Each structure stands twice: as structure tokens, then as C-alpha cells.
Image (spheres, grey):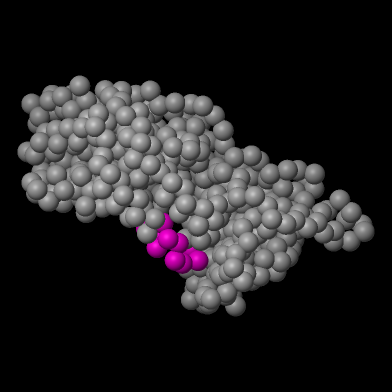
Amino acid sequence: MTSSSSTTTARTSSEARAVARTQTLIKGSNGIGTVRKTTLPGGLRIVTETLPSVRSATFGIWAHVGSRDETPALNGATHYLEHLLFKGTTRRSALDISSAVDAVGGEMNAFTAKEYTCYYARVLDTDLPLAIDVVCDMLTGSLILEEDVNIERGAILEEIAMTEDDPGDCVHDLFAHTMFGDNPLGRPVLGTVDTVNALTADRIRRFYKKHYDPTHLVVAAAGNIDHNKVVRQVRAAFEKAGALKNLDATPIAPREGRRSVRAAGRVELIGRKTEQAHVVLGMPGLSRTDDRRWALGVLNTALGGGMSSRLFQEVREKRGLAYSVYSYTSGFADCGLFGVYAGCRPSQVHDVLKICRDELDHVAQHGLSDDEIGRAIGQLRGSTVLGLEDTGALMNRIGKSELCWGEQMSVDDMLARIAEVTPDDVRSVAREVLGQRPSLSVIGPLKDKQASRLHDAVA
């Protein structure tokens, strides 16, 4: 988590102030797993993790912008922009972008979340320079033409429709609205049909210029790579695009704040002719910077994180009331959510909700057994390591860590933090989080009498 070494290099005498600062954040064994960071003049950060034993590399650029940065009128702009950066630059058409990566058997994609956006490409290690050039070009040279905005609008409206057709996905957006209300964290990342239809090329261009400054970006690469080569290639790409203008600029700090979720006892129902009722019962959780998040992770795993979890055993194994039932946590910069999802027959929805609420209340009051906690710690440690077995996952870890925390944690440190969680830690966080009055979101074909009883689950 702390720097073990640092170097400073100047390019030429005429660029005396154009200095890049390099740090070794995690020193691996024989170079394997070494994480290094270079901050370029102009505020662009480049973080890499070296894994010489593989033949692939994943290159990504993270932007410090998500749907929570949007005004109501701009809802969906971040995701819209994600689509448009693939539509063409001053150097490449949309076909040129996709065919360049396809021609070397690579994969390229992007995703938008509430607090960040990421663009990435996974290629053979020998094709990394191509991936760097293409992704950097997209981030620095996007045209955002009006004709492309109009064409892509249709694709985004179809994506919204696709989400609406999947109530198991849509119910999580509804739960965010139930908990946060009409504010940025409560609005859908995709936007709505009305907001997407209202967005213009000019408004999206202004949004792009404001949020895609180098100080708002983190470059991350992982795999069989050389840190210094990646730095030189990225710097050349950004300088060629004229993106590194203000050499005195410094990187934007991770998000901060002390905003809390205060929703309690709220119920939102969307009536829809589906075969199942989809429910999320939940309450405020912890922010992603809260030290208790490790204990909450263990609690979440034991309560609804696997086939041996309490909720899976009680709802599915013992009673067969649902096929899919699980718990989850979402941590933001200044707040969080804890939720329990289940999909079941509409006639069984009240039985499922009662079991879930009873389990939440029981764990809040009495905690979990030492055996359950021990098993959850082992499961969480194993899944953490197994989830980092490819270069894409490694790139995600180091990129998100730099953007959201401003520091790196080695896998060994992460495993140690999980192992240090005690039964008392888990019971304490269970009392605080699960002891709150929950709220409820439901999508399904519930009749009036069934709907009127939903408040019983949050009473």
C-alpha cells in the first residue's frame, strides 16, 4: 500500500518541467505481481501489474465520471458517451476501431457505473502497442458527430428496452430508486427514454470535455508487459493528440463525502405480467472506504453468498421457494447498500419475504455461528484469488484501486484483511446494518390484495 521506491525522469532540457514520477507500489516476487505507477505531467496516471507467465495483456482507461455526476436533464449522458467513443475519431472510423482489434483476435469493450467508466482491450502481449494506440485514440480524439449521436440513440433505447424486459435486472435499478430517491445514485445508469431522447450532440460534447481531462483518467495495464514501454507509448499517444496541455495539473482525488442513505420502510412496486415476482429487500450498507467492509463481506458471504449460505439453504434447499436467492453489497464513496434478491412465483412472494426478513432479524440480534463465519472467511479468500486469475481482472483491480482509493493493496494484504475478521467484528456489523428497518422493491404480477401486504415485510 505504500511506495517502496520512486524515480523522477526528465525528457529533454527544453521540457524541464515535463517530469514523470514513477513509484513501485507493490514489489512482487522475481518481478511477478509488481505494481508500478507513473504520473505524467498533466496529471495522467499510469498503473501496471506485471505477470510474465502469461501471453496476454489487458489495457484499460478509467474515467472519474459516472451516472452520479449527471444532472436530471443529463441522466444517461455518461453511458451515451461510452457508446459514442467507439463511433470514430479524427484518425479512425468506427469500423477501423473494431477491425483493428478483431484482426489480432482481441476483445474490446467498455462499461459505465455510477461512479466511473472504463474502456479496455485484451490482446496478445505482442499486440499491446496496438491496443494502447486504439484505446488512447478513442479517449482523446472522439468526434461525437451529430449523425452518430442520432444513430446510437436507437441502440441505447434498445438497450433500455432490453433491460426493461429483464425484471431480474430491472429490480436492482428500482431498489436504487427506492433507497436513494430522485437523486443521481437513485437514477438508472442508462438513463430513461425521455432523457436519452432529449440529449443532443452539443451537450454530450461539453460533458466529454469536462470529464475526460487527463487529470480525471487512470490508465491501467496488466499481463506480460513492461511498465516503461507502456508509459512511453501512452505518453506518445496523449501528446500526439494534444491532450497533455496543462503540465502543472495534478490528478483529481478520489471521491469523498459523508452522504448517508436514510430510506426506511419504503415499498415500491411495478406491476408487470411476468412469470415470477422479483424482489429486493434491503437497507443502507457501508461505503467502500469503511474499514468494516471486510467484516461486511464475510457477513454477506455467510448470509447469501453461496450454496451453503443461510438464505440459499432456507429459501431454496429446504423449501424450494426460489431458484435464485442471494445477498449482495454495493459500496460507493460515501454510502452503500445491502440487499437480498429473490425470484419466485407470485403466490409465494410473501412466504419468501417473511423468511428473508426473519433471517435478517435473527442474524442482527444473534449473529452468526463461529462455524458459519469460518466457512465464509475461507470462501471469500478463495473467491478473491480465483477472481484474479486473468489479466482483465488484474487490470480492473489496479485501475479501480487507483481511481477510487488512490492506493494499491496486494492480494496477500487483501487475504490478510479477510483472515483478520473476527466473529465479534461480523456480529457488530450485522447489528448495525441488518438491525435497520429495510425497504422493499418488487416487480411482478401481484394482485391488489398481495400488493397491500408488501408493507408487512418492512414493518
Q: Is residue 337 visible?
A: no
273 or 297: nearer the viewer: 297
Per the rendered image, the range of residues in magenta is 383-392
Give the answer, above or below, for where 329 lies relative to 46. Answer: above
Q: Is residue 416 left or right of residue 341?
A: right
Q: Position of residue 4 (x, y in %)?
A: 69, 55
85 or 55: nearer the viewer: 55
Give the residue displayed 51% in from the left and 53% down from the top. Answer: 413
449 or 360: nearer the viewer: 360
Give the residue displayed 8% in from the left and 39% down from the top. Answer: 348
Q: Is residue 20 left or right of residue 363?
A: right
Give the answer, above or below, for where 239 lies relative to 131. Answer: above
Q: Quadrant of the C terminus?
A: top left
> For the stretch drawn in magenta, what is the main secondary structure?
helix
Q: Say which quarter of the image contains residue 188.
A: top left
Q: Is residue 303 left or right of residue 232?
A: left
Q: Is residue 310 left or right of residue 173?
A: left
Q: Say which quarter of the image contains residue 449.
A: top left
Mark count: 0
Give the residue displayed 39% in from the left and 55% down from the top. Answer: 381
Give the answer, above or below, for where 436 lies relative to 297. Answer: above
10 or 273: nearer the viewer: 10
| 391 magenta-colored | yes
Q: Position of residue 126 (x, y in %)?
A: 60, 78
Q: Position of residue 374 (x, y in %)?
A: 31, 49
Give the residue displayed 80% in from the left and 44% down from the top. Answer: 248
Q: Position of residue 35 (x, y in %)?
A: 61, 60
Q: Is residue 390 visible?
A: yes
